[in-house]
């Protein structure tokens, strides 16, 4: 039996299915025992990651229920949920297993909201049972649920992520065409294998991958299409190593016709998993099986990855999705609004398309919220109303972070003088915070590298570039830097 160590689930209320656990009524003693175990796990965690990090990430995480070897934790926000699952999932599971072998899997969920909804949560519109095409709120994206036999891996992905529901515009037309082409071809062409789709967060990579899945299965339901995230791949592989079951792991991929791996950047810096992935990859390509990959970065920008792997990844068709344009955002909103249960005036769509430019996921969330307020509270949908309902998102969008703010925050965080941000000193104690600040300036402002260099004591743009690369590297290898950066980013954007 294989399983993933942790998963983040539960994007919203809809996904929090208490019924599933209704049978898990625990006796007082069992509960007490579980709490004691949690305490021990927390103690070990605190020792390992330090008080500060522990408080930041686990301070508000609550113990949930345990059923059939699956243990639930509840996190107060999505951010914490994802962070805990991603960065501490393995350790929580390992520590728990050291305390008791009963726990086979740990899941981090969003704390279910209290009866009156929290104002800052996106409200999910209850799905309409009758019509299949009606507008559905985003569903939680679970990795293939594992632990109940390998067949689960071949489960249908998100039903609404189809080509028909994908709005095509300039930024994504090439990736869309490439995806369709792969889905429609009879056999893989070596020059288009693998298809490597890359682009920023929330721009539709996963949507396109699932769409390929649906289209292939529609053409031939017998085709074995395996979709999984790179994280899932890594977790399963580690688990297989632990339980000395690598043959079973390899077997999973042997009979696959099409392999899709989402978010391959996750594999960076994980040597053993990379090797295994490379091996799986090559053996499928040799058998002329199609491979589809997605990533947040082009192959050339992936770090901590072997050269042979990098060239393999980029050896087929590389298609990027650019950040969205106003036109694309508006047309996505128009498409989605057509199936909403209340009419949304064109001006409101234009307003939202104009204001919410981060990514499509946020855009969808914003429309959801406006529609839900209109529908549930019977409010007329107007620009003023949208402004009111989306005030937190809009504040973020309007909020421009300055280099001054970044330097001040970072200096305060590391307890160094503000002047060190532009001083020539190169001691690590000031150079590292300076690099963090440069990195944040690149991330959070629209300034160019030379412009940023100027603000840091007239440094050259190559120095800034080096700083950005360095911090990107450290974010993978050094947990405390990763946390510092995330924390600072949150404070600056908050
Ligand atoms: P990524 O994998 O790139 O982070 P997703 O594929 O998860 O992004 O997309 C985020 C959300 O935005 C999904 O709900 C998806 O359906 C929606 N979306 C993204 N691009 C489009 C598009 N072109 N048309 C319709 N919906 C889109
Ligand atoms: Mg994705």
Image: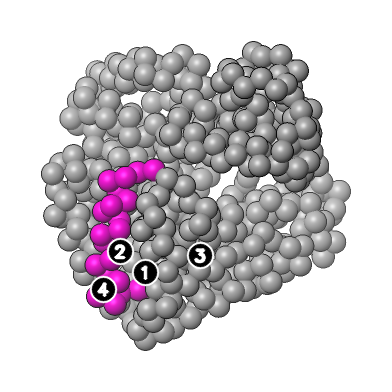
Q: Position of residue 283 (x, y in %)?
A: 24, 67
Q: Is residue 176 left or right of residue 364?
A: left
Q: Position of residue 384 (x, y in %)?
A: 86, 48
Disc 4 residue lies near ligand 2 with CB under 8 A: no
Q: Which residue carries the number 3 mark?
A: 197
Q: Is residue 42 left or right of residue 429?
A: left
What secondary structure is found at the residue carrying circle 3? Answer: strand
What secondary structure is found at the residue carrying circle 1? Answer: strand
44 up-or-down from 392: above or below: above
How far apart in space, not on screen, are marks 4 and 1 (Cα)? 11 Å
Q: Residues within 10 Å of mark 3 (few under 14, many from 20)?
A: many
Q: Which residue carries the number 1 mark?
A: 291
- Confirm whether the magenta stretch covers residue 277: yes
Q: Which residue carries the number 4 mark?
A: 286
How far apart in space, not on screen, are marks 4 and 2 (Cα)? 9 Å
Disc 1 residue lies near ligand 2 with CB under 8 A: no
- The answer to whether one can see residue 439 in this image is yes
In magenta, the rendered stretch is 269-291
Residue 449: which quarter of the image? top right
Q: Residues within 10 Å of mark 2 (few under 14, many from 20)?
A: many
What secondary structure is found at the residue carrying circle 2? Answer: helix
- State the mark number for residue 281: 2
Mark 3 or mark 4: whose residue is earlier in sequence: 3
259 up-or-down from 361: above or below: below
- Looking at the image, which is closer to me, 450 or 472? 450
- Confirm whether the magenta stretch covers residue 125: no
Mark 1 or mark 2: whose residue is earlier in sequence: 2
């Amino acid at each position: 039996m294989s399983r993933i160590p942790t998963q983040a689930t539960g994007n919203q209320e809809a996904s929090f299915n208490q019924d599933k656990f209704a049978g898990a009524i625990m006796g007082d003693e069992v509960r007490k025992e579980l709490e004691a175990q949690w305490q021990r796990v927390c103690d070990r965690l605190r020792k390992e990651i330090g008080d500060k990090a522990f408080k930041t990430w686990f301070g508000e995480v609550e113990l949930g229920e345990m059923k059939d070897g699956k243990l639930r934790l509840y996190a107060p926000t999505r951010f914490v949920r994802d962070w805990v699952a991603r960065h501490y999932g393995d350790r929580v599971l390992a520590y728990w297993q050291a305390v008791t072998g009963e726990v086979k899997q740990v899941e981090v969920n969003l704390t279910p909201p209290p009866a009156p909804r929290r104002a800052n949560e996106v409200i999910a519109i209850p799905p309409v049972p009758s019509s299949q095409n009606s507008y559905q709120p985003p569903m939680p994206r679970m990795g293939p649920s594992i632990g109940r036999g390998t067949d689960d891996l071949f489960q249908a992905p998100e039903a609404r992520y189809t080509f028909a529901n994908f709005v095509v515009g300039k930024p994504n037309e090439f990736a869309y065409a490439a995806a369709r082409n792969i889905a429609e071809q009879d056999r893989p062409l070596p020059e288009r294998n693998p298809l490597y789709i890359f682009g920023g967060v929330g721009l539709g990579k996963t949507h396109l991958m699932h769409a390929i899945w649906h289209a292939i299965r529609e053409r031939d339901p017998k085709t074995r299409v395996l979709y999984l995230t790179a994280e899932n791949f890594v977790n399963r592989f580690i688990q297989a190593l632990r339980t000395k079951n690598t043959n079973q792991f390899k077997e999973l991929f042997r009979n696959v016709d099409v392999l899709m791996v989402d978010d391959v950047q996750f594999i960076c810096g994980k040597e053993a998993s990379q090797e295994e992935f490379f091996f799986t990859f090559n053996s499928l390509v040799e058998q002329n099986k199609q491979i589809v990959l997605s990533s947040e970065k082009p192959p050339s920008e992936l770090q901590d990855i072997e050269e042979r792997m990098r060239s393999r990844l980029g050896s087929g068709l590389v298609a990027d999705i650019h950040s969205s344009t106003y036109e694309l955002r508006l047309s996505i909103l128009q498409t989605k609004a057509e199936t909403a249960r209340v009419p949304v005036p064109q001006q409101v769509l234009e307003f939202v398309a104009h204001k919410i430019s981060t990514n499509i996921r946020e855009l969808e969330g914003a429309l959801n919220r406006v529609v839900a307020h209109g529908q549930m509270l019977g409010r007329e949908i107007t620009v003023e109303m949208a402004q009111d309902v989306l005030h937190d998102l809009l504040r973020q969008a309007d909020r421009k972070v300055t280099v001054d703010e970044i330097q001040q925050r970072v200096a305060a965080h590391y307890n160094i003088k503000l002047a060190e941000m532009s001083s020539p000193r190169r001691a690590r104690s000031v150079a590292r915070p300076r690099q963090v600040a440069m990195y944040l300036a690149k991330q959070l402002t629209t300034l160019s590298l030379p412009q940023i260099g100027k603000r840091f004591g007239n440094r050259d743009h190559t120095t800034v570039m080096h700083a950005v690369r360095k911090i990107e590297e450290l974010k993978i290898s050094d947990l405390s830097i990763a946390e510092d950066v995330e924390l600072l980013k949150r404070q600056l954007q908050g």
